[in-house]
Image (cartoon, coloured by chain):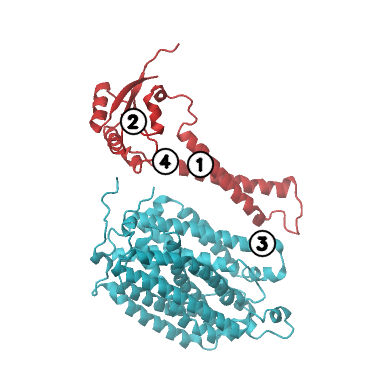
Amino acid sequence: MREAKPWGMLAEFENTQTFYKGCEKIRDAGFSRWDAYSPFPVHGLDKAMGLKRSNLPWIVLICGLIGASVGFAMQTWVATTAYPVIISGKPFFSWQAFVPITFELGVLFGAFGAVFGMFGINKLPTYYHPVFTSDRFARVTDDRFFIAVEAQDPSYDERKTKKLLESAGATHIEQLED
Amino acid sequence: MSHGHAPRTVAAEDVIIPSGHALAKLPLIAAVVGLIGIGASFALMGDHPEQFYLSWLTNFAFFLSFGLGGLWFVIVQHVTRAGWSIVVRRAAENLMVTLPVFALLFIPVIMGMEHLYHWVHPEEGDVVLQGKLGYLNTTFFLGRAAFYFIGWALFALFFYAKSVRQDESKAAQISRTLRGVAPVAIVFFALTLTFGAFDWFMSLDPHWFSTIFGVYYFAGTTVATFALLALSAMVLQRGGLLKGVVTTEHYHDLGKYLFAFNVFWTYIAFSQYFLIWYANIPEETMWYMYRMEGTWLYVSAFLALGHFVIPFFYLMSRHIKRNRKTLAIGALWMLMMHWVDMYWVIQPPLAHHHGGHGASLSVLDLTTFIGIGGIFLAVYAWRMRSKALVPVGDPRLAESLAFENL
């Protein structure tokens, strides 16, 4: 059996105002290894958490360009080299005819990039996470808001971090083990 | 939460152009320049009336885009009950009230019908044009034009008058009334714009036909209109107006529309080309043949590159749409490309019929641009000066002021 070691702390908030304030305090204290959980999207929370804009658009752009290139190259190769057939008297290399599939593959690969890139950035699927050991955490899908701070964060200090979260209005704080 | 500092109301000095302001003189200056442009165009007509009428029609199509685009923008905001756009809606309303003036600017097109439209005198034995006589004849053409202009003017003035009345009365009922009329207006708009484009621009080559042509012209007008809406707000803000009223968030949305409708234009333009290329029927392919002969091929290539490839990658970035300077460059570029598009649509067929094989800009393209553009700008700026720059009585103005993109 694995030895249980402290993973971090889970703070519970009863409303969005204290939750929002808690995020701002953790952000301003310079934490990097922490996350916020809420039952619904809280407008402006990304700013309160100090999150940078996602890199996802770049992933989508690159995937889309790869998809379009693959689509165009594939059709060019098939129509001119692998299986050249004269269709309604047009040249083998008729780029006009290749445009719809080039476009579609660009969109398809872009969509793949968006979905799987999002999975990757969010580390999904995650089958186990220490916050699941908390019984109270189940209410995150209903009416409670949580901030989890990892013990590995350089700014982490069991006593000070707890006080910081309490000063923001956390109603319950528990220690989590991995 | 994070947007608690946005102003809930607007101050009068931010939305009224003061009488001593440089922009207050713009209507008069533009009108004088426009009249000089029109005078110069007529003086230069000389022995080549064809070029005069073609240049006139090109610039008529270009500037009419803003009137129609403004009307369309206003109707769509009411149909969708849009909140974000209220602070830029008055600019579009000022654009659409230029529509009645285009009925006057259409008079030279009527004068030049014999030069512009081959179908006025179809040759003996031209069975195609004989068959189209029921639609393409002078009487019906003029009747339709009158119908379009009267309809556009009535809708534009109705929406304008109601919106201006709301500035004082602040009545929410006016918004509900306009929301009720807008769906009727949008059906009327779609049909009249389509047939207007068929009549005035597609029938330049009366053997040719393309059912998507109306949508093609529409797509171009939307791109040009979003570009002009963004630029208008920037000019007003440089003049010290609309401070904190039109924000980066609104520019970002106009930029998104500019990008999206430019892609829409490309989609329509390619769809038209693609089907004609595939079917390869001579009476359809002629239209593209004219545009691939001689130097016209370069204009066509420039259009594909400049109206799609370059702005597609340029306007894709969020940073470029949210920065005023870079958005202004994109908007100016799109205005230029819309002009090239109108030139490419209107000028080749007649140049071909008169034996020319290349694209060459005429001085009349410039003088008619100044002439029609001056008159258009005079009316636009006159409306801007006469009323508040923002519909201050709209009950949901605060929603628009506080608007934020996610």
Q: Residue at x 64, y 77 (%)?
A: B206
**Amino acid type at mark 2:** Ile
Which comes before the other along the chain, label 4 or label 2?
Answer: 4
- Label 2 to label 1: alpha-carbon separation: 27 Å
Tag 1 secondary structure:
helix
Chain B, chosen colour in render: cyan
**Label 4 sits on residue:** A54
Say which quarter of the image contains residue B348: bottom right
- Label 2 to label 3: alpha-carbon separation: 57 Å
**Label 2 sits on residue:** A147
Q: Chain of mark 4?
A: A
Q: Is residue B55 visible?
A: no
Q: Chain of mark 3?
A: B
- Label 1 to label 3: alpha-carbon separation: 32 Å
**Label 1 sits on residue:** A114
**Label 3 sits on residue:** B275
Same chain? Circles 1 and 4: yes
Chain A, chosen colour in render: red
Pointers 2 and 1 in contact (CB under 8 A)? Answer: no
Same chain? Circles 2 and 1: yes
Tag 4 secondary structure:
loop
Q: Position of residue B400 (x, y in %)?
A: 34, 57
Tag 3 secondary structure:
helix
